[in-house]
Image (spheres, rainbow, N blue to C red):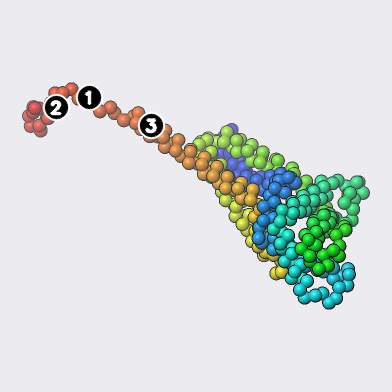
Amino acid sequence: MPPRLRSALCAALLILSCLLVPLGALAAWAAYGLADTGRYVTTMAPLATDPDVRDAVADTVGAEIVREVDNRYDVRPMPSTVEPFVHDAVRSFTQTPAFRLAWDEGNRATHDAILRALREEDDGRGRSGTGDRGVIVDFGPVTEQVKRQLAHDHVPLAARIPVAHTEVAVVSAGELDPLRKGFHVLEVAGFWLPVAAVVFAVAGIALAVRRRRAVVAVALGTALGGALLAIAVAVGRHLTLADLPADAPHPAVGAVYDALTSTLRTASWLLMGLGLGVTLTVWLTRYVRLLYARTRTLPAPPAFSGEPVAERSAEGPPVY
């Protein structure tokens, strides 16, 4: 192969490898991190003790309880002291072990329902087992635990809170098809993109005329890919919070986003550390080799015999 063509092919392979590093990390995170129910529940579990998340849950659940009692049982006018008392009781409930259990079970139920919907196949007539309602999650057990806590605290009308079939539409039917297709693409890309990045890097280094420089190029490209991944996570957080309605709990959503992307941020730092570490190692080995080669080529100093060294004058014989 001509040297020019070989260098061009080597450069193309190394560039492809560096481009696939952040994309492969992102795809692997989505396919194997978010798609695993156990990992998802473990990731979300610490949020049950986050103050912003607990406040958001207390406000949402408290307002829903008051609304349901008001609408279903026509309790009008609602006593002015009931609503603040309900909110305080729900906020107190969010600090109990029962709430943490309900939080984990609610996240598990939601994730299981979404995952089953995404992995279902059409029956040949463009329909799947989810039907026309999309993904529906029943939070009846969670509401039942809240109701028991409110009744224990002697909250007025707590016994009349409806808990049967508390269903929430998590994903609409119209959103399922594109989400299902994207999920299948992520499952394939999450495995093959990292593999392709490694294969391209090895092939590029093998073709390189100066392999040490090729290794440094791959290492620096990996570090740059990790930095771009970290920037993408930060920009995604900003855009996510900016798209929320004004009355949405921004701190709680930010805490959830940070929890979900914690593995991705760790991967970005690992990529940067790996790339810079390999670059520094290559530079140090080269420096040590040059230093060793220089010490071997230096002339040996003259041996000292114990006799005086003759000094040669410019006009006569040596003077001792």
Contact between labelled residues 2 and 1, with CB atoms less than 8 Å apart:
no
Residue linked to disc 1? 303
Foreground: 284 or 273?
A: 273
* Side of 43 relative to 289 (left or right): right
- Label 3, secondary structure: give it: helix
Q: Is residue 226 above or below residue 86?
A: above
Q: Earlier in the sequence, mark 1 or mark 3?
A: 3
Residue 208 position in % (x across, y down)? 55, 36
Foreground: 180 or 164?
A: 164
* Side of 94 relative to 311 (left or right): right
- Rate crowding at label 3 as few (under 14), some (14 to 19) or many (20 or more) other CA atoms within 10 Å: few
User: Is residue 171 in view from this perspective?
Assistant: no
* Quarter in which the N terminus is drawn: top right
Residue found at x 82% / y 57%:
144
Residue found at x 69% / y 51%:
45
Q: Earlier in the sequence, mark 3 or mark 2?
A: 3
Residue linked to disc 3? 292
- Label 2, secondary structure: give it: loop
